[in-house]
Image (tube, rainbow, N blue to C red):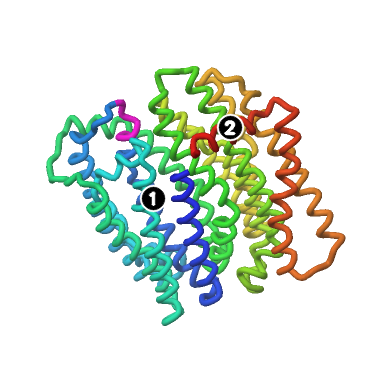
Amino acid sequence: MWAGGIKLSSRFLQVLMLIVLARLLAPRQFGLVGIALISLSATRNFSQIGLKTALIQHKSENIDDYLDTAWCLEAARGAVIFGVLFAFAPVIAGVFDEPSATPLIRVIGVGPLLFGLRNPGVVYFRKDLEFHKEFIYKVSGGFVQFFVGVGYALVSPTVWALVFAYASADVFRFGLSYFVHDYRPWPSFDVSIAKELIDYGKWITASSVFYFLYKEGDDAFVGWFISATALGFYQYAYRIADTPSSEVSEVFASVSFPAYSKLQDDPAEFRQALLATTRLTGFVTIPMSLGIALVAPSFVPVVLGSEWTRIILPMQLLALYGLFHSITRNFGSVYKALDRPDLIAKLSALRVACIAILIWPAAERFGIEGVALVVVGVYVFPMLPLDVYIVSRLTETDSMALVREWFYPAVAAGGMFGGLWQVRKLIEVSPLVELVVLIPTGVVVYTAICFPLARYSPWQIESDIRSIAGSLG
């Protein structure tokens, strides 16, 4: 619940900020910041050495002996990223033919410098499942980002409102990290510890590179091949449509990785945890994804404005990606917990290769809709079947047992989507009324279909909900 609070609060504040700024800034300005964020993400992912993952996965409860070395490595990495972004900002901006992005890239580059110097002791929050402490640390930064971004835009509605919003959150979290945890790092470096951490993290580095290529390579391609304005549209559609995967299922993944790590020597308990996590994730994220596709035609003009209607179809297509990706999101936690992070890198490499082959002709023929279609199609095949097969073999779980956990919520959500889609075609109302009515009606219809499925089928979601309620009580 605390992990959910982190994601819900952070995402709510970010989306609220973007909605407000969408009324004050032009799509092209979002595209310019998108170029800076892609540059930042590229340097971070290409230099990711998996230190936090290695520390969480480590069987020792006390990892104080590792923290100073990890802090030195992260500080060096942050300094290198800042230096690269500052020096090469004009070159990066030139690639996108947007020289005005140069100062934006340089200012946003301060973020990894501060991240590298933060208190390494905050890794204990996740390792020890103390998410109430991580809630304070992360959500408070989200409030700072929101108030700085909106406040600046109200005074000066320029692209700098977005830049200073992101930078202010990094500055605040850096200072807060030393307030919320009493560990105090010292510049000391142990070569053997560094070698141990990096040896585990080398596959995290590889998977991080490929993660960037398939997660944001399409963004970079759109900005380069089409335009900065198209990038603004595409990124906005992606952020909203991928909410079930990037936010909700990440809640389960953030908890499942340290939990799986504690169960790595107990295969039976591990399998039960995997099935329960998969069941709960599908129950929550499948109706969310189909709901996003359902309300997109009314949501966009009402909430974002008429100049954003270009994103409706890409948003609906990418909602399908959010659906499929969300139900397999916690598989990465399985690979890492069982000391097989190499599988993440290898699967990601295949995914990048498939997207690279298809993205150019699709974008040339269909624009950003074609790019969205490639992202969805590659995940449906071959990635989804491969993910299920490998996880089932690795954990000795029946693959059909995993599929069954998705089947029941898919039936309920599909019934909800089909029924409301037909009703909307029969009744003509304003987009505002349609949006206000569709969301609560969708929740009621989905719940009504789930009830008999849970009562008269092998689906165990009812017992899971009762167990969660009992734990909270």
Q: x, y percentage for residue 262?
A: 38, 26
**Residue drawn at (58%, 41%) of the image:** 325
The residue nearer to you, when weighing 119 against 27, is 119
**Residue drawn at (74%, 64%) of the image:** 434
The residue nearer to you, when weighing 185 against 25, is 185
Say which amino acid is labelled 2. Asp
Provide the residue designation for mark 1: 135
Residue 17 belongs to the span the image colors magenta: no
- In the picture, measured across the screen, residue 98 lies left or right of residue 365, that is left
**Residue drawn at (52%, 65%) of the image:** 16
**Residue drawn at (27%, 33%) of the image:** 197
Say which amino acid is labelled 1. Phe
Quadrant of residue 365 within the rendered picture: bottom right
The residue nearer to you, when weighing 356 against 80, is 80
Res 342 seen here: no
Q: Which residues are magenta?
A: 54-59
Q: x, y percentage for residue 236?
A: 56, 61
- Above or below residue 262? Residue 86 is below
Provide the residue designation for mark 2: 464
SS of the residue at dot 2? helix
- In the picture, measured across the screen, residue 276 lies left or right of residue 340, that is right
Q: Which mark lies nearer to you, 2 or 1?
A: 2
SS of the residue at dot 1? helix
